[in-house]
Image (cartoon, rainbow, N blue to C red):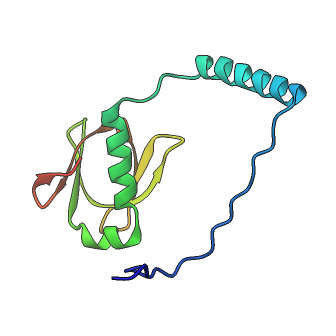
Amino acid sequence: MGTRPLLFIKTPPAFFKEIEKFDEVKLAILEQQDESLLISQENSPVLEDGEMRKRKERLLFLSNPFQQKAYQPLVFVVNDGRKIAGEVQEVNIETQEVMIRTTNDVVHPISISNLDDLLWRGRSFL
């Protein structure tokens, strides 16, 4: 065997850029930004728990057009006892709501925290 490579991979060229050294002024500005970031993070609300994050990821996954068709029928079980059959039309992360569109094209906005379960073919999906 020679020194030739065994595998050729076509990739774009890679360029390396040298990092400039920071002077004292830039370093002081960065430290001030870090301190202000820490203060703003202390005042921000506590991060959501893993269960809520998992629900959001699953609902966002189901809001994609292909998954809307592939994962049917979905039954959303709300904590007030309602069962809504439909698909995820949209997930709004800011308001923590999911828009559920039924087969009759009726849209139900429901808070993600109010969903008890999501059933797909009789199995829990959340």
User: Which residue lies most toward the left here?
Assistant: 122
Question: Would you say 107 lies left or right of 114 here?
Answer: right
Quadrant (top left, top right, bottom left, bottom right) of the N terminus: bottom left
- Residue at x 25% of width, y 36% of height: 79
- x and y percent of residue 85 in the render? 24, 59
Q: Is residue 100 visible?
A: no
The residue located at (39%, 82%) in the rendering is 2
Apparent side of residue 88 relative to residue 37 in the rendered image (left or right)? left
Q: Nearer the viewer, residue 39 or 5?
A: 5
In which quarter of the view is residue 51 placed? top left
Q: Residue at x 49, y 45 (%)?
A: 93
In this view, 72 is above or below 100: below
Q: Is residue 5 left or right of residue 71?
A: right
- In the image, what residue occupies the spot 35% across and 36% down? 52
Residue 89 locus on image (x, y percent): 41, 61
Residue 97 quadrant? top left
Q: Quadrant of residue 112?
A: top left
